[in-house]
Each structure stands twice: as structure tokens, then as C-alpha cells.
């Protein structure tokens, strides 16, 4: 392969990788990935959860779909979206983890939202199960009902 052909190959290759970066380069699209990581959703459900118009939500989903990060399934008149693979979920986790590690602004935003975090008690999954069995706690699931139906902690109450 000559130098010019090699250069063309590399340019094309990295432009394809950049498609992923471009698709991820909007906070609303990252939020969509986070919501879809919890289960398949309709455009209408996503729109309500994100306080966006259906048209705006659809446009963001189309960008993610063009980058092959999400897939769509037709269900009558509705389009239901889901993450395209476990790899997309791992990509989203990596972006989140790196952001939390490298961007102090993320910690400031979270701290401002959860002002009294020091009063929260961290417990293991086993401890939570034990407390549930003993009736010492009630788990309230505050996610949208559709997400709750797609999976939740046994005994949790949807509100």
C-alpha cells in the first residue's frame, strides 16, 4: 500500500470513529442513552421523561441511530428504541466514569443537587434484601412506570 492510499485509509477510518463522538456530543443524547440503558422505550415516554417535544426527541434518536448506537422496533403506530448492544452500554458507562474521574464540575453539580449526601447510609445489596425481608425498609422506585415494569427490585413500590 502506497503512502497516499495508507493516508486515505487512515482518514476514512478515523472519520468513521468520529461519527460515534459526534453522536455522543450532546447532553440530551447522552441522557437518552442513560434512559435506554434501563430498557426499551417509546419516543413519547422518552419525550415526557426528558421534557422535550416528540420531534426533538426523535431528531436526537435519529442521530444515535445513524451512528448505530440505538435500534428501533415498530410496535403498531409507535417506535420503540433500545440500545443497539451491550457495547453501547459499556461506552456510556466509560464516558460517565471518565467524566466523574476527570471533571470536577460533575462532582459540583451532583453535590449541589444532593446537598445532604453525608446523611445517606450506603448498604450492600444483601443488607437491602435482609431489611426488605424483615420489613424494616420500603423501597420506592421513582422511575417512570414503564421503566419499573421492565425491571425492578423485588418488593419495590412504584411511585
Image (tube, grey):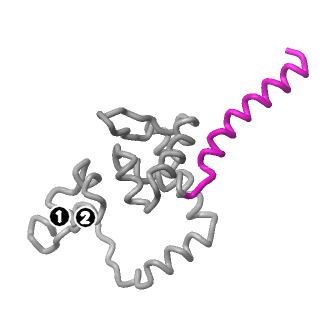
Q: Is residue 125 left or right of residue 88?
A: left
Q: Which mark is residue 157?
A: 1
Q: How many labels does the image show?
A: 2
Image spot of residue 78 (x, y percent)? 34, 39
Label 2 sits on a secondary structure element that is: strand
Q: Position of residue 7 (x, y in %)?
A: 85, 26
Indicate whether residue 35 is drawn in magenta.
no
Residue drawn at the location 85% of the way across and 19% of the way down: 5
Q: How far apart are marks 2 and 1 (CA)?
A: 6 Å
Above or below, comparing residue 81 to residue 147 in the picture: above
Q: Where is residue 1 in the image (x, y as percent from the top left)?
A: 85, 14
Q: In which quarter of the image is residue 101?
A: bottom right
Q: In which quarter of the image is the C terminus?
A: bottom left
Position of 43 compared to 63: left or right? left
State whether residue 148 is above or below residue 110: above
Circles 2 and 1 in contact, beta carbons < 8 Å: yes
Q: In the rendered image, which quarter is residue 4 located in? A: top right
Q: Give the range drawn in magenta.
A: 1-27
Image disc number at residue 141: 2
Q: Where is residue 70 in the image (x, y as percent from the top left)?
A: 47, 38
Q: Is residue 1 above or below residue 114?
A: above
Amino acid at each position: 500500500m502506497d503512502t497516499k492510499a495508507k493516508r486515505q485509509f487512515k482518514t476514512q477510518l478515523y472519520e468513521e470513529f468520529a461519527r460515534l463522538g459526534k453522536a455522543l456530543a450532546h447532553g440530551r443524547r447522552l441522557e437518552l442513552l442513560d434512559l435506554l440503558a434501563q430498557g426499551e422505550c417509546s419516543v413519547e415516554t422518552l419525550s415526557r421523561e426528558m421534557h422535550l417535544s416528540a420531534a426533538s426527541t426523535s431528531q436526537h434518536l435519529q442521530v444515535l441511530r445513524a451512528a448505530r448506537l440505538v435500534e428501533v422496533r415498530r410496535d403498531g403506530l409507535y417506535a420503540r428504541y433500545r440500545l443497539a448492544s451491550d457495547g453501547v452500554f459499556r461506552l456510556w458507562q466509560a464516558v460517565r466514569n471518565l467524566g466523574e474521574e476527570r471533571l470536577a464540575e460533575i462532582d459540583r453539580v451532583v453535590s449541589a443537587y444532593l446537598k445532604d449526601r453525608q446523611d445517606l447510609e450506603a448498604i450492600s445489596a444483601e443488607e437491602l434484601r435482609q431489611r426488605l425481608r424483615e420489613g424494616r425498609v420500603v423501597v420506592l422506585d421513582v422511575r417512570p412506570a414503564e421503566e419499573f415494569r421492565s425491571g425492578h427490585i423485588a418488593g419495590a413500590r412504584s411511585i
